[in-house]
């Protein structure tokens, strides 16, 4: 079995983002998806801090600290891009105007519950940012994550044990070894890396998995 | 003649008082009114409630206020940052209270205050720790949490340019919370890089109409670039 690396995962998610989509990419791994969106597709990247039509990182000499993304990294604005205040930015999410958001996760349940903001550790300082708004607001929520923790525990679970970000909000999970549709009908495997079988995947996750019709 | 231009930062914040609630614009450093916050530290007001997206980083701004022990409570969405050590220490010591609010609910509650709404039903946070104990309602098959407005005594915001009637335009993502905080506070104080004559701002492009702004004070331009 050949696990996908970070770049391959980002490229795989990018393949599923269609022309014309309004997309919010979360901080961390999801940000890399931008590097793989085909130039010929018009895709509108939204950043929660008030820009639409976000472009790639600038050259060193063009850095402007009033033009940053949600991760507070310098970015650029494409021709046709726009700025707006926080009320409008979160209306874009909550109001159902964002087609796809891509988020990282600690855990996703087979019915699409998401846990990605807080480990629940008593000494942790909680911070939530825009995660809960994106989770409930975007029409489709994609999660990008390694299937297993460093300790070998599945992050795709029957029920999340970490505090929830949103209920039944995730539609698809892109992991390093397989892609799953999740939701009210449970988890369906839609792709696996070569050399991996559904039974191995069931062993790895310990959850009930069905093969999607298209690959069964 | 109405002239909202304050001659100095010191005079712009002169009527701050102990126990005040203060909204502070900014997402990270972009849009953070650093000069006004320095003026608040010099002013000496304490026991403050700060409403902002973050809880400060480094040694200046909100972090500077916390370091100087002026802050009783922070209402924000994302306190934990790489250099939020002043907040972290006082929070862990129980010296600063935290009300953690999802970022969009923070915006919606500020907007509710500025718009005169009694409360809003928001889907964000439903079923999570951050909605525990709050009233909920199902409307058209979707679940919502009742969230109340956040008012403030003062808003300190940063804009690119303003005129003596208080009309403001912003610069890039430094706009962030400025326009909605300006509407929600009893007294809104805007620091600007440039004061312009009445009529110089294109009325089609004014972002914050002067009705929401009480004072405008000029500071040296591009302070964010220098601070970053």
Image (cartoon, helix red, strand yellow):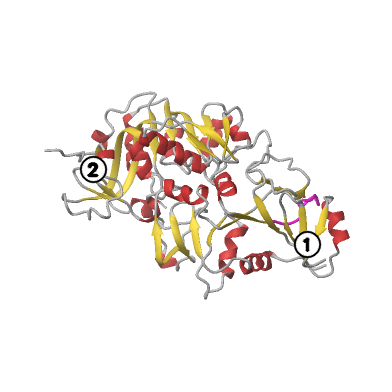
The question of residue B70 being in magenta is answered with: no
The residue furthest bottom is A40
Q: Position of residue B88 (x, y in %)?
A: 55, 36
Q: Mark 1 belongs to which subunit?
A: A
Numbered tag placed on residue B166 in the rendering:
2
Q: Are marks 1 and 2 in contact (CB under 8 Å)?
A: no
Q: Is residue B180 left or right of residue B135?
A: left
Q: Above or below — where is A43 with respect to A207?
A: below
Q: Above or below — where is B103 with respect to A22?
A: above
Q: Above or below — where is A143 with respect to B62?
A: below
Q: Which stretch appears magenta?
A: A145-154
Which residue occupies 19% across, 51% down?
B196
Q: Position of residue A34 (x, y in %)?
A: 56, 65
Name the element at disc 2.
loop
Q: Mark 2 belongs to which subunit?
A: B
Which residue occupies 34% across, 51% down?
B223
Q: Is residue B2 left or right of residue A81?
A: left
- Closest to the observer: A167 or A145? A167
* Residue under numbered circle 1: A212
The residue furthest left is B1
Give a yes or no on whether discs 1 and 2 share a subunit.
Answer: no
- Give the Cα distance between marks 1 and 2: 59 Å
Mark 1 or mark 2: which is in front? 1
């Amino acid at each position: 079995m050949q696990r996908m690396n970070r770049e391959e995962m980002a490229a795989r998610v990018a393949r599923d983002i269609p022309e014309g989509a309004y997309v919010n990419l979360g901080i961390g791994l999801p940000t890399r998806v931008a590097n793989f969106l085909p130039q010929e597709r018009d895709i509108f990247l939204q950043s929660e801090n008030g820009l639409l039509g976000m472009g790639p990182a600038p050259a060193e000499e063009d850095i402007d600290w009033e033009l940053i993304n949600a991760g507070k990294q310098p970015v650029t604005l494409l021709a046709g891009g726009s700025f707006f205040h926080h009320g409008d930015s979160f209306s874009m999410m909550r109001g159902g105007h964002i087609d796809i958001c891509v988020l990282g996760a600690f855990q996703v349940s087979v019915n699409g519950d998401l846990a990605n903001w807080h480990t629940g550790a008593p000494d942790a300082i909680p911070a939530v940012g825009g995660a809960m708004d994106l989770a409930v607001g975007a029409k489709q929520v994609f999660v990008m994550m390694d299937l297993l923790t460093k300790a070998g525990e599945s992050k795709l679970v029957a029920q999340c044990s970490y505090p929830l970000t949103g209920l039944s909000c995730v539609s698809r999970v892109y992991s390093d070894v397989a892609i799953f549709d999740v939701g009210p009908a449970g988890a369906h495997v839609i792709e696996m890396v070569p050399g991996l079988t559904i039974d191995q995947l069931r062993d790895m996750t310990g959850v009930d998995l069905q093969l999607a019709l298209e690959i069964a | 003649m109405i002239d909202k231009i304050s001659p100095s930062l010191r005079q712009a914040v002169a009527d701050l008082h102990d126990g005040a609630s203060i909204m502070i614009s900014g997402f990270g450093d972009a849009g953070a009114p650093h000069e006004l916050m320095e003026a608040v530290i010099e002013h000496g007001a304490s026991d403050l409630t700060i409403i902002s997206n973050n809880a400060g980083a480094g040694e200046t701004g909100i972090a500077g206020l916390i370091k100087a022990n002026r802050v009783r409570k922070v209402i924000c969405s994302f306190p934990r940052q790489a250099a939020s050590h002043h907040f972290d220490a006082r929070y862990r010591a129980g010296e600063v209270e935290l009300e953690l609010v999802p970022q969009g609910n923070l915006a919606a509650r500020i907007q509710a205050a500025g718009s005169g709404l009694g409360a809003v039903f928001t889907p964000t946070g439903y079923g999570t720790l951050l909605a525990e104990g709050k009233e909920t309602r199902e409307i058209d098959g979707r679940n919502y949490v009742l969230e109340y407005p956040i008012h403030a005594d003062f808003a300190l915001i940063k804009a690119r340019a303003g005129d003596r009637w208080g009309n403001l335009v912003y610069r890039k993502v430094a706009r962030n919370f400025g326009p909605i905080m300006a509407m929600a506070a009893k007294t809104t104080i805007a620091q600007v890089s440039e004061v312009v004559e009445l009529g110089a701002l294109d009325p089609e492009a004014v972002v914050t109409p002067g009705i929401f702004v009480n004072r405008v004070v000029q500071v040296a331009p591009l302070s964010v670039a220098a601070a970053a």
